[in-house]
Image: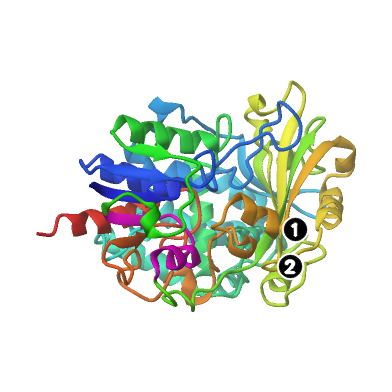
Amino acid sequence: MLDAVIVGAGPNGLTAAVELARRGFSVAVFEAKDTVGGGARTEELTLPGFRHDPCSAAHPLGVSSPVFRTMPLDRYGLEWLQPQLPMAHPLLNGGAAVLSRSVAETAASFGPRDAGAYRRLIEPFVGKWDTLLQDFMSLPSTALPRDPVTLARFGLAGLPPSTWLMRRFRDEPARALFSGLVAHVIAPLGGIATGAVGMVFALAAHARGWPVARGGSQSISDALTAYLKDLGGAVHTDYEVKRLDDLPPARAYIFDTSPTALARIAGLGRSYERYRYGASVFKIDYALDGPVPWTAKEAREAGTVQVGGSSAEIGAALRAASRENRAPDPPFLITVQPSVVDPSRAPAGKQVFWAYGHVPNGWDGDLTDAIERQLERFAPGFRDRVLARATAGPAELVARNANYVGGDIACGAASGIQLLLRPKMSLFPYSTAHPAVFICSSATPPGPGVHGMSGHNAAKAVWRTLHKP
């Protein structure tokens, strides 16, 4: 009998497996798709030689991940590549606000009236980033805070809505960039703890950057898999699990799946009926005949580029997709251009590029024209660079990854109390009504992102259970 079986080979499932295997437990992972990766995959979606990331591409939380930093993933081929600028936010006047590794450079891009406010907000936490992130991404039930005073100060600043926090900024560059940071969780700007979301992404850039993985996000999943196998773990792909009886006997079963799938497979009935799924995205992967022709020079050297004219425009786009059940026009876009730092991703002189805008959960329309009109506002002539495109709305996203219910790439709405307490209000969110069944996906704290901490936290809950007499 195995000690643990993991269902789903995304970053959290693989991390949970590694954490158990390196503590001497026997583990096996079962994945429905023919490759590992979940939200961290790389494929030729458009033309030969163009290697795209179907979901995650830039990894501010991956490079900072407390659990990844304890693993020798570099020995298994994972290399982080840092663009010259982590992120840029083009403005309607042709300039840009930037998120630089330097707090001072970032503050200067906001203008003199907001530079001081930004530095006062961020600088107290930059030097304590590693400890703060460890505390922020763990739970009191799995680990006591290492620096409770700093965590409390961060909470006082970040727990209110981001709209409150942004009152300290007087001009649009700072407000637009910070609104875009908050929008990465695909939820309205006025929700609880959304200020913390923006602060986390900003601090991540200052502390360790917003890198891409050389060769694509698949490198993260492949490194975790190779490490797991060296530890004695097994990985089985092309293995769809429909019920617990499909799996070999084990002392514990850990699901890197949506709560909906977990309840169906494990026979947990209506355990997660109150769990909410959020807005989706409409994503386009591009093969380009050269770099994106951004008007703002800062955007040409940034790995990630946020595309939204103003904080008001960004807020309206999020409300449309999340609350008004309609596709925004213009949409707010998050874009990543890996080729600025990794030329291996495309043939010589060409580039890969991806962009997504928010749409309602389950939306069945086509946002291509709206996305490209928005890009043309800040990069005139963009369409002339397009060699091929691969589009994915909610239905296509679900087909690629069943965890994205209705196209929700966060595996559950990251808004309201569910941003903090997921998949239900409990001090033990990784446990379920079945004593041998656990959940470790992005539906559990600390939530979405390729960081493995949900898998790490769940593994801690499992090994404590397995050690009980």
Q: Position of residue 438 (x, y in %)?
A: 34, 61
Residue at image x 80%, y 62%? 365
Disc number at residue 141? none
In this rendering, which labeled residue sits more in front, label 1 or label 2?
Answer: 2
Q: Which residue occupies the foreground of this view, 357 or 210?
A: 357
Q: Which residue occupies the foreground of this view, 89 or 235?
A: 235
From where the camera sits, is residue 75 visible? yes
Residue at image x 64%, y 53%? 399
Cα separation, mark 1 vs mark 2, equals 9 Å
* 114 left or right, relative to 203: right
Disc number at residue 317? 2
Q: What residue sits right under mark 1 in the picture?
A: 308
Crowding at label 2, few (<14), some or many (≥20) Cα neighbours within 10 Å? many
* 169 left or right, relative to 242: right
User: In this picture, is 410 found above or below 294?
Assistant: below
Q: Which residues are magenta?
A: 251-267
Residue at image x 73%, y 74%? 325
Q: Which residue occupies the foreground of this view, 461 or 352?
A: 461
Residue 378 forms part of the magenta stretch: no
Q: Which residue occupies the foreground of this view, 405 or 297?
A: 405
Tag 2: amino acid: Ala
User: In this picture, is 10 found above or below 138?
Assistant: above
Q: Position of residue 411 (x, y in %)?
A: 53, 61
Q: How is the image coloured?
A: rainbow
Tag 1: amino acid: Gly
Mark 1 or mark 2: name the one nearer the start of the chain: 1
User: In this picture, is 36 found above or below 128?
Assistant: above
Assign a secondary structure to mark 1: loop
